[in-house]
């Protein structure tokens, strides 16, 4: 039996056809391990179709704080032939493969959803056959000392159906997901009660589903115990001393949405688009909010007819005094840009959650990329102040969301919150969110009692009053004595349309000076963070967004070889924190930029704003997020002088 109290690191991959329950059992696995006090990082990969194409979930488990996935697989849990064809080459020596024993004669040509890349990969593995079968790949795995467990899934499902006297269960092929996962956990000696607890948690809103899956899991554990030798091929050493009270398991599509609830956002709009829709769907399922005053609050979530309507509605809500946001991805953001400029002209506090995916056009709608950075920075015709801000992981996205609503209202401008598919479709253990860490600051939001009088003693409100900091007192629409006008045209302090050149200059100066105020007032930690591996190192990695986790884990791997490197994470991308970044780079001789796009967009911002040039660019744009392994290998080669290429393209990922 595996000693659960003595763990280091373990990587699972669970795969099957889209719609076969891959996500459900991956979340069961993550929850089960989390109950031991272990750190979890998981990522979901799926095609842009509803059902049938290949889907897989990587779950990494460790006693140490981890931030990313790795390429190698310790345990591969498969529901179908395609998962074996795609992933068996990455299973480590002494790893485990769980498979359906009835499909071993399946030829590669029979799996019609396989791509040319996989065909070529298999042909390199099995060179002696034109049409390799699953058995050929199992033989290949056996030669690598991989432990193979063929489970008769349908036979097991039929026996379970007979045991509980429910013939309909035998037709529920989807239940194979729980049978296969339970088989793998039983083989490594996992605690059944922990598994049952995790199943009940994942299906807590569906009691009948939870009960039948728990029964199936118990039945499978008994079957494995009676039919297989429970040999632990992987020596796991899990530290069970962690205090679970301060750890939570959070999905990426939940964190920013939770931040919106805590921030006081009470109006969100969206038009369905991957991967941003999950943000709004989570809010829709939690629209009634328990408040600390024992009353119930609520958030209104509206699915608009298109993205133009979505941002226009959110702007209208923000003008009425409500904290408002909209969530979208690249194609949808393209449609929102004109209205974004309207919000900039009218100094409307608005948060846009931009969940990046691979473009251009529809691109890879369910895959990852960081290709929208320069688009966000330069979004809109003409010039107007905005904030572009990037979160690096799930935990940051919660706290950042709250801050960004503050920034939007303090500086009265639109804020673009850069997230992406890698964050939205991952899961990880975080410290318990502490909503008391950040105070709510609504800026110069006034009501009737605070409106000022003019010299004649009559009330006259100037919505766009020119002030020393460029930020005018703001009142919600409908405030009885706060009459003002909104227009897309240039305007006077009251909001009336004007083309007067003097007023134009004054109003442009008023708006644009907010960028200087932002740079003066936002804290350094909210602009950029430095992770110093060694003060003696003159080599620095610079990056932004979701590459953070893989970079941090790669740096830990380099430490084991006594290789030192520093890491700067840029959080505020516009206005660019030039002075701070220059200071952080003072002792840097070699600067390496890492990001998920073709043109190394952050490099362009650095070149535009700093005198310090980037020496190496490490990029990836195949739609799969960077692993810590591939970053580690690229950085190691640079540090030891093995790679003299100035541009390194990473390509890992199935």
Image (cartoon, rainbow, N blue to C red):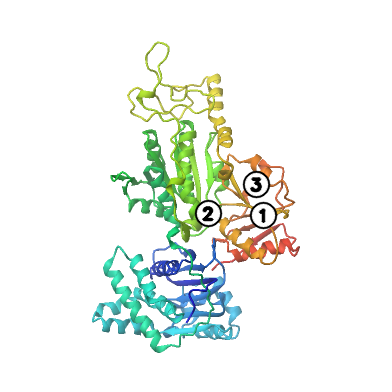
- N-terminal of the pair, mark 1 or mark 2, is 2
Disc 2 secondary structure class: loop
Where is 173 relative to 567, above or below? Answer: below
- N-terminal of the pair, mark 1 or mark 3, is 1
Residue 377, image x, y percentages: 56, 42
Asked whether residue 575 is in view, the answer is: yes
Where is 251 relative to 504, above or below? Answer: below
Q: Which residue is mark 1?
A: 566
Disc 1 secondary structure class: strand
Per the model, the C-alpha gap separating discs 1 and 3 is 21 Å
Mark 3, residues whose alpha carbon is within 10 Å: few (<14), some, or many (≥20)? some
The disc label shown at residue 604, or none: 3
Task: Name which residue lies at 48% across and 51% down.
Answer: 397
Which label sits in the foreground, 1 or 2?
Answer: 1
Q: Which residue is mark 2?
A: 359
Asked whether residue 249 is in view, the answer is: no
* Label 1 close to label 2 by CB (< 8 Å): no
Residue 5, image x, y percentages: 49, 73
Which label sits in the foreground, 3 or 2?
Answer: 3
The disc label shown at residue 479, or none: none
* Label 1 close to label 3 by CB (< 8 Å): no
- N-terminal of the pair, mark 3 or mark 2, is 2
């Amino acid at each position: 039996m595996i000693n659960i109290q003595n763990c280091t690191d373990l990587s699972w991959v669970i795969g099957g056809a889209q719609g076969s329950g891959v996500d459900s059992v991956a979340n069961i696995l993550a929850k089960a391990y989390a109950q031991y006090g272990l750190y979890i990082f998981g990522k979901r990969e799926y095609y842009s179709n509803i059902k049938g194409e290949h889907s897989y979930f990587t779950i990494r488990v460790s006693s140490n704080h981890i931030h990313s996935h790795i390429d190698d697989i310790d345990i591969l849990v498969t529901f179908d032939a395609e998962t074996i064809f795609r992933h068996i080459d990455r299973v480590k020596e002494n790893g485990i493969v769980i498979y359906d024993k009835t499909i071993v004669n399946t030829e590669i040509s029979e799996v019609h959803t396989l791509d040319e890349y996989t065909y070529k990969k298999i042909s390199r593995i099995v060179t002696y056959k034109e049409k390799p079968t699953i058995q050929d790949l199992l033989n290949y795995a056996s030669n690598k000392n991989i432990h193979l467990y063929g489970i008769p899934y349908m036979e097991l499902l039929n026996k379970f159906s007979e045991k509980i006297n429910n013939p309909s269960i035998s037709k529920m092929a989807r239940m194979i997901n729980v049978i296969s996962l339970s088989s793998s956990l039983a083989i490594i000696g996992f605690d059944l009660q922990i598994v049952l607890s995790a199943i009940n948690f994942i299906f807590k809103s569906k009691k009948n589903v939870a009960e039948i899956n728990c029964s199936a899991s118990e039945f499978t554990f008994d079957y494995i115990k009676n039919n297989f030798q429970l040999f632990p091929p992987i020596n796991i050493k899990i530290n069970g001393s962690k205090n679970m009270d301060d750890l939570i398991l959070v999905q990426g599509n939940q964190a920013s949405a939770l931040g919106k609830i805590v921030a006081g956002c009470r109006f969100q709009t969206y038009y369905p688009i991957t991967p941003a829709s999950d943000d709004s769907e989570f809010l829709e399922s939690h629209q009634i909010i328990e408040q600390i005053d024992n009353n119930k609050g609520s958030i209104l979530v509206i699915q608009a007819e298109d993205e133009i309507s979505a941002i226009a509605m959110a702007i209208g809500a923000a003008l009425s005094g409500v904290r408002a946001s909209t969530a979208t991805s690249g194609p949808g953001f393209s449609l929102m840009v004109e209205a974004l400029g309207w919000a900039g002209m009218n100094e409307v506090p608005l948060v846009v959650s931009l969940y990046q995916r691979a473009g251009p056009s529809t691109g890879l709608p369910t895959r990852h990329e960081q290709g929208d950075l320069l688009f966000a920075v330069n979004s809109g015709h003409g010039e107007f102040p905005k904030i572009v801000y990037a979160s690096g992981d799930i935990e940051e996205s919660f706290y950042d969301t709250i801050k960004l609503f503050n920034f939007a209202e303090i500086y009265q401008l639109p804020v673009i919150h850069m997230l992406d598919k890698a964050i939205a479709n991952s899961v990880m253990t975080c410290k318990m969110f502490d909503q008391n860490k950040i105070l709510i600051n609504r800026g110069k939001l006034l009501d009737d009692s605070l409106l000022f009088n003019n010299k004649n003693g009559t009330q006259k409100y100037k919505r766009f009053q020119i002030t020393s900091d460029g930020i005018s007192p703001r009142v919600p629409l409908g405030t009885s004595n706060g009459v003002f006008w909104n227009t897309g045209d240039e305007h006077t302090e009251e909001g009336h349309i004007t083309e007067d050149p003097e007023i134009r200059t004054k109003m442009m100066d008023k708006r644009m000076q907010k960028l200087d105020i932002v740079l003066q007032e936002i804290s350094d930690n909210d602009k950029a963070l430095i992770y110093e591996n060694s003060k003696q190192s003159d080599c620095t990695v610079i990056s932004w967004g979701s590459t953070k986790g893989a970079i941090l884990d790669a740096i830990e791997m380099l430490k084991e070889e006594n290789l030192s490197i520093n890491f700067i994470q840029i959080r505020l991308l516009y206005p660019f924190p030039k002075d701070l970044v220059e200071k952080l780079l003072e002792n840097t001789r070699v600067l390496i930029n890492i990001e998920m796009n073709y043109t190394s967009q952050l490099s362009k911002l650095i070149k535009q704003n700093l005198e310090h040039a980037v020496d190496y660019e490490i990029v990836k744009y195949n739609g799969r997020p960077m692993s810590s392994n591939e970053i580690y290998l690229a950085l190691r080669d640079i540090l030891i002088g093995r790679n003299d290429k100035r541009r390194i393209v990473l390509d890992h990922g199935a």
